[in-house]
Amino acid sequence: MKKYPTGSQRTNTTAPLKEVFEELLEAYRLKDTFSEKTVIQEWEQLMGKTVASRTQNLSIRQKVLYAKISSGPLKKEMMMNKSKILLLIEDKYGKGVVKDVVFL
């Protein structure tokens, strides 16, 4: 990580926006919250349109993802594949964002 000058000093160096944004999230301790919101926002891309259309509510509390599923057979199928869902989330968003999934 590069250290940026303090005060009114200006330099001609530039940094990629992604790097600066990640440093900002770490500085304000918002990285976990941002990752959790991203998981909820991208649920349809992660699980597909069929699952997303039958998902009524998503929330994350204390690193546990709560998903309310309107279809009984789909809920049972997702319960059986909980470990695969956790692996998908871990691969895309990093380890520790979601530690468990509960289907309601």
Image (tube, rainbow, N blue to C red):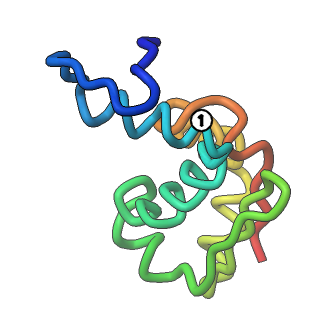
Residue at the location (60% across, 43% down)?
Answer: 31
Q: Which of 65 and 72 is in front in this view?
A: 65
The residue furthest left is 12
Residue 66 shown left or right of residue 62 in the figure: left
Residue 102 shown left or right of residue 83 in the figure: right
In the rendered view, tell whether residue 43 sits above or below residue 20. below
Q: Nearer the viewer, residue 39 or 10?
A: 10
Assign a secondary structure to mark 1.
helix
The number of numbered badges drawn on the structure is 1
The kind of residue on which mark 1 rests is Glu
Q: Where's residue 19, x and y in %?
A: 36, 28
Q: Where's residue 43, x and y in %?
A: 46, 62
Residue 1 shown left or right of residue 34 in the figure: left
Image quadrant where residue 58 sits: bottom right
Q: Where's residue 66, x and y in %?
A: 74, 68
Residue at the location (55% across, 79% down)?
Answer: 55
Residue density around tag 1, few if under 14, some if 14–19, many if 20 or more, within 10 Å: few
Residue at the location (39% across, 72% down)?
Answer: 50
Image quadrant where residue 36 sits: bottom right
The residue furthest right is 62
Q: Name the residue carrying label 1.
A: 26
Q: Which of 64 and 15 is in front in this view?
A: 15
Residue at the location (68% across, 72% down)?
Answer: 59
Residue 26 shown left or right of residue 52 in the figure: right
In the rendered view, tell whether residue 95 sits above or below residue 66. above
